[in-house]
Amino acid sequence: MQAQIREDQTVDGKEVAYGKDPLQTLAFWAPTLQTTRPAPLILFVHGGGWKRGDKTNATGKAKVAHFREQGYAVASIDYRLVPNATIEQQAADVAGALAYMKAHAGEFGIDPARIVLMGHSAGAHLVALVGTDPRYLQAAGLSESDVAGIVPIDGAAYDVAKQVEIGGRFMAETYGQAFGTDPERQRALSPTFQAAAPNAPAFLILHVQRKDGIAQSQALAEALRKAGTPVQINDFPGTGLKGHMVINRSLGDPSYAATPVVDAWLKARFGS
């Protein structure tokens, strides 16, 4: 698996600092399909249990290449990591990166009105949190209308307390480091419990056949629908850690089932 991750590294993006911390950086790729119109942007947030991973080894070559070919710009962010940072600070980093890209849209040739947040695993949790709890966008001088949509990919911590309960010993240290034991804080960091309006304008929730991921994705979708937020949920083959990795690595491969689903949703959100 480590060899696959190394093979999948994306290292050719333009390095940009969106904040003062060494980890507050992003890689930017302009679309390969050039037009005179400013390009939509996909802002990607990597996974890694909130404590590892980075913008070069957890984004996905196929994803970057494919979206650029569709006429979209792509940015993949680094963010401060647990235990040196909190989940709250990580969500603030996501919102801060979004604010930076919007403020510098002209320099990057992107359309500030057409930006989607996409994330995998822990990154799926973070983009869902920023898309449901308005405090993070507000602190960055933004609102829910400043993002076109949210695409969480195979996350499983949308209801933190439930995930801690079923995570078992394998993930106990990771969840404990990230979320602590205070029920009120766990609820505040749970997108499912923050999904009352206002939310980001639309969600596309993707998951594979992991029991916890299925239940968590369905519960988040139900909470969003209850709030009147448009949400689409799609499931794909794959089990265990391998399936969890494959959906991220393969998204963008035209032969992978999730790629045309995401393409159609993005086209509808971006109006292109």
Image (cartoon, rainbow, N blue to C red):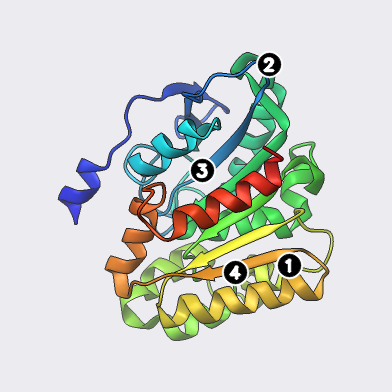
Residue at disc 1, secondary structure: helix
Whichever of callouts 3 and 1 sits on the residue coming sooner in the sequence is 3
Whichever of callouts 4 and 2 sits on the residue coming sooner in the sequence is 2
**Is the residue under label 1 in contact with that under label 3 (CB below 8 Å)?**
no
Alpha carbons under labels 3 and 1: distance apart: 21 Å
Q: Position of residue 193 (x, y in %)?
A: 71, 73
Question: Mark 1 highlights which residue?
Answer: 194
Q: Position of residue 116 (x, y in %)?
A: 63, 44
Q: Which sits in the foreground, 231 or 176? A: 231
Q: Name the amino acid, label 2.
A: Gly
Q: Residue at x 55, y 32 (%)?
A: 72
Alpha carbons under labels 4 and 2: distance apart: 33 Å
Question: Mark 4 highlights which residue?
Answer: 233
Q: Residue at x 40, y 78 (%)?
A: 210
Q: Judge whether 148 appears above or below 20 on screen.
A: below
> What is the quadrant of residue 175 in the picture?
bottom left
Of discs 1 and 2, which sits in the foreground?
A: 2
Whichever of callouts 2 and 3 sits on the residue coming sooner in the sequence is 3
Q: Judge whether 50 appears above or below 27 on screen.
A: below
Query: Is 67 situated left or right of 113 in this image?
Result: left
Q: Which sits in the foreground, 148 or 212? A: 148
Whichever of callouts 1 and 2 sits on the residue coming sooner in the sequence is 2
**Is the residue under label 2 in contact with that under label 1 (CB below 8 Å)?**
no
Q: Name the amino acid, label 4.
A: Ile
Question: Mark 3 highlights which residue?
Answer: 44
Q: Which mark is residue 106?
A: 2
Residue at disc 4, secondary structure: strand
Q: Name the amino acid, label 3.
A: Phe
Farthest-out residue, left: 3
Of discs 4 and 2, which sits in the foreground?
A: 4
